[in-house]
Image: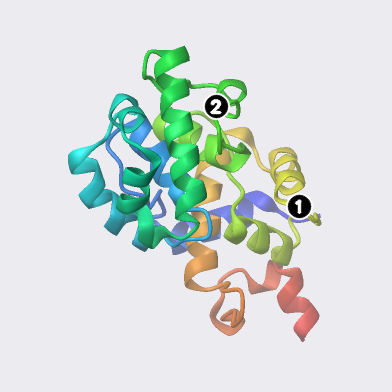
């Protein structure tokens, strides 16, 4: 049985500045930035949103734009046609059903076009300060490599992590796992030799 609190303690010391790297000033900006981050780096999303949010940064703004206009703004983010469609539809739904405001429950968020559990969890955790574990590719990889969970899908990983991690650590664990995945436990060339939690990691132990 893994000592999850010990692992998180070490990762929190290793990454004291772990935080959401998507730049935003409102819950709506974070929602849009997270939708754009699918199969795209946070660095690229931030470049796009820095310019775009100066012109448009409310649901009403985006609801008024055509899909083509949104595409033009987000073209370098990849999957831009699909993302533009979802951003416009979500903005229209927010204006229609929520007075332009982003709802603060998982049940309401996942009703929005293009918003799955990961996006909803990012918004809940970072915009509304609610306990949530968003599982992206880094969290999925790191949690399974260490052996905290043994799961095949992000959704199963989320539920398994919710069981394994104390609720008050859910949100921050998401950030330290992402920082660890980006900086050390990389997909192709993990830096196992210098990893501070290698003695607690199934992946490292299996390589010896």
Corner quadrant of residue 31: top left
Q: Nearer the viewer, residue 26 or 57?
A: 57
Residue in view at x 53 percent, y 40 percent: 119
Residue 129 seen by the camera: no
Say the numbered circle drawn on residue 186: none
Residue in view at x 68 percent, y 72 percent: 199
Secondary structure found at label 1: loop
Q: Nearer the viewer, residue 20 or 88?
A: 88
* Residue 52 coordinates in the image, percent (x, y): 25, 46
Q: Is residue 190 above or below residue 23?
A: below
State the residue position of label 1. 153
In the rendered view, does 183 fall on the left or right side of 187?
Answer: left
State the residue position of label 2. 109
Crowdedness of circle 1 by 10 Å Cα count: few (<14), some, many (20+)? few
Residue in view at x 67 percent, y 51 percent: 4
Q: Is residue 203 above or below residue 33?
A: below
Identify the mark nearer the N-term, 1 or 2. Answer: 2
Q: How is the image coloured?
A: rainbow
In the rendered view, does 190 fall on the left or right side of 204?
Answer: left
* Residue 48 coordinates in the image, percent (x, y): 30, 55
């Amino acid at each position: 049985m893994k000592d999850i609190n010990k692992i998180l303690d070490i990762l929190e010391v290793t990454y004291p500045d772990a935080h959401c790297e998507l730049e935003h000033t409102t819950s709506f900006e974070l929602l849009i930035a997270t939708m754009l981050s699918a199969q795209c780096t946070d660095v690229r999303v931030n470049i796009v949103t820095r310019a775009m949010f100066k012109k448009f940064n409310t649901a009403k703004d985006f609801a008024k734009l055509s899909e083509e206009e949104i595409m033009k703004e987000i073209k370098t983010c990849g999957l831009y046609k699909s993302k533009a469609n979802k951003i416009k539809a979500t903005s229209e739904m927010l204006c229609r059903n929520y007075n332009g405001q982003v709802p603060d429950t998982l049940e309401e968020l996942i009703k929005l076009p293009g918003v799955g559990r990961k996006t909803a969890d990012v918004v809940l955790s970072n915009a509304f300060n609610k306990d949530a574990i968003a599982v992206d590719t880094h969290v999925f990889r790191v949690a399974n490599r260490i052996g905290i969970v043994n799961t095949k899908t992000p959704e199963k990983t989320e539920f398994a992590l919710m069981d394994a991690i104390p609720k008050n650590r859910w949100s921050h664990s998401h950030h330290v796992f992402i920082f660890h995945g980006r900086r050390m436990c990389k997909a192709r060339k993990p830096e196992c030799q210098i990893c501070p939690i290698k003695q607690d990691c199934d992946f490292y132990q299996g390589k010896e």
